[in-house]
């Protein structure tokens, strides 16, 4: 017998694979949205633990399909054992593996970290290169990883689009796009140059802690007034 009072259907807020898309914000509204995020976190930084450009590169490679928290639990011991590209290359995939078994895809990541470390020693004198072309030629380094390193280590105005930024760009109308590259290109064009470098961190942190995948916590969003998402969650669930 059907229930007399069926449970209401759970709102569909979209997902990383199929994000809900809002109408595109006008440029002034997009800038106001970013500046609102800036007021809440004027000096944003990555949550990955690192001590130099090499350890940043390795941490970002390890963070693919893994949380920053999970990466941070294993990298201190790894970096203590192998603080330089030469030391990491000497460890090899077999030596790196035991340090990172707790994160996803650790076998392939161990191979990539060993290989990119060898490349840094053999092709770049042990230094991390500062160009996109050279970074993306390293094993395990794609566009997103290169953007993070160029942004955080070399101060370049790049936008690394992860699942959080992809979802956020679509959901709020800041930069709707069907692929991460579309969202990236739109964000780079629409965010003022003086805000672009930090905007990478503002958006990641906002998507991670406020504009969450399953249900955005709009009631505590500092940029809510500038968001075009129509199904805002204006109070915590009871």
Image (spheres, rainbow, N blue to C red):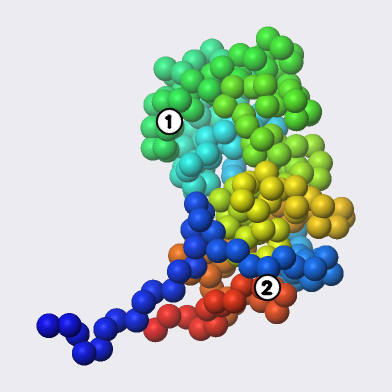
Q: Residue at x 21, y 90 (%)?
A: 4
Q: Which mark is residue 106?
A: 1
- In-image side of 197 versus 183 (left or right): right
Question: Can you give x and y, in whole percent of width and height, for residue 29 in the image?
Answer: 79, 71
In the depicted structure, whether residue 97 falls above or below residue 232: above
Question: Can you give x and y, in whole percent of width and height, for residue 84 in the image?
Answer: 63, 22
In what element is the residue under mark 1? helix
Q: Quadrant of the C terminus?
A: bottom left
Residue placed under numbered mark 2 in the picture: 227
The answer to whether residue 158 shows anywhere in this view is: yes
Question: Can you give x and y, in whole percent of width and height, for residue 96 in the image?
Answer: 46, 23
The answer to whether residue 47 shows anywhere in this view is: no
Q: Residue at x 79, y 37 (%)?
A: 154
- In-image side of 70 versus 126 (left or right): left
Disc nearest the viewer among 1 and 2 = 2
Q: Residues within 10 Å of mark 1 (few under 14, many from 20)?
A: some
Determine which quarter of the picture holds residue 118: top right
Determine which quarter of the picture holds residue 26: bottom right
**Residue, far front:** 1
Q: Which mark is residue 141?
A: none
**Residue, far bottom:** 4
Q: Residues within 10 Å of mark 2 (few under 14, many from 20)?
A: many
Q: Quadrant of the N terminus?
A: bottom left
Q: CA distance from mark 1 to mark 2?
A: 38 Å
**Residue, far top:** 122
In the depicted structure, whether residue 219 falls above or below residue 84: below
Q: Residue at x 53, y 70 (%)?
A: 216
Q: Earlier in the sequence, mark 1 or mark 2?
A: 1
Q: Residue at x 81, y 57 (%)?
A: 190
Question: Can you give x and y, in whole percent of width and height, for residue 230 in the image?
Answer: 59, 76
């Amino acid at each position: 017998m059907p229930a007399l009072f069926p449970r209401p259907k759970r709102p569909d807020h979209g997902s990383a694979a199929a994000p809900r898309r809002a109408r595109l914000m006008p440029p002034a509204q997009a800038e106001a949205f970013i500046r609102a995020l800036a007021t809440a976190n004027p000096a944003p930084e990555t949550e990955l633990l690192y001590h130099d450009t090499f350890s940043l590169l390795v941490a970002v490679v390890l963070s693919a399909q893994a949380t920053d928290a999970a990466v941070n639990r294993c990298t201190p011991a790894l970096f203590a054992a192998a603080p330089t590209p030469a030391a990491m290359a000497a460890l090899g995939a077999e030596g790196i593996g035991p340090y990172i078994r707790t994160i996803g895809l650790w076998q392939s990541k161990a191979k990539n970290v060993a290989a990119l470390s060898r490349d840094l020693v053999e092709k770049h004198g042990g230094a991390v290169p500062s160009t996109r072309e050279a970074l993306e030629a390293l094993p395990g380094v794609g566009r997103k990883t290169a953007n993070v390193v160029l942004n955080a280590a070399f101060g370049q105005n790049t936008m690394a689009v992860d699942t959080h930024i992809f979802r956020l760009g679509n959901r709020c109308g800041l930069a709707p796009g069907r692929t991460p590259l579309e969202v990236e290109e739109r964000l780079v064009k629409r965010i003022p140059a003086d805000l672009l470098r930090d905007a990478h961190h503002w958006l990641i942190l906002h998507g991670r802690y406020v504009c969450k995948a399953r249900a955005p916590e709009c009631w505590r969003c500092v940029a809510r007034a500038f968001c075009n998402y129509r199904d805002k969650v204006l109070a915590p669930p009871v």
